Image (cartoon, grey):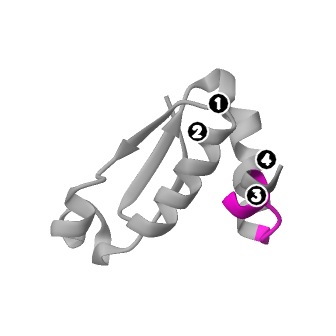
Amino acid sequence: MVEVFSGSYFEAMNVRNLLEVNEISVFTQNEFMSNIEPWVVASGGLNAVKLQVDQLDLDAARVIIEDYLKGINDLVDIEDK
């Protein structure tokens, strides 16, 4: 598994949903602790949730995440298709 994203709980869940809609399996690290004690799992509590994907899905996941961060790809666009 390769880490492809780290962020707040809510942003990480958005990215995870985008990846899963595109049939990419995602492992979410620190999902629950990031809400309870984010400073325990990350310095200052920032970017506490980490998303990991299989090495085979790495390139596709990076494209999806880059588009998301640019505001190009979101769940509204996918649901309209």
Q: Which residue is mark 2?
A: 20
Residue 69: mark in rendering:
none
- Residues tagged 3 and 2 counted as in contact (Cβ below 8 A): no
Q: Which residue is mark 4?
A: 63
Q: CA distance from mark 1 to mark 4?
A: 14 Å
Measured as percent of width and height from the top left, residue 45 is found at 30, 74
Q: CA distance from mark 1 to mark 3?
A: 17 Å
Range covered by the magenta-colored residues: 70-78
**Residue 23 sits above or below residue 52 on the image:** above
- Residues tagged 1 and 2 counted as in contact (Cβ below 8 A): yes
The one of 60 and 20 positioned closer to us in this rendering = 20
In magenta segment, residue 11: no
Nearer mark to the viewer, of 1 and 4: 1
Q: Amino acid at mark 3?
A: Glu
Nearer mark to the viewer, of 1 and 3: 1
Q: Which residue is mark 3?
A: 66
Q: Which residue is mark 1?
A: 23
Q: CA distance from mark 3 to mark 4?
A: 5 Å
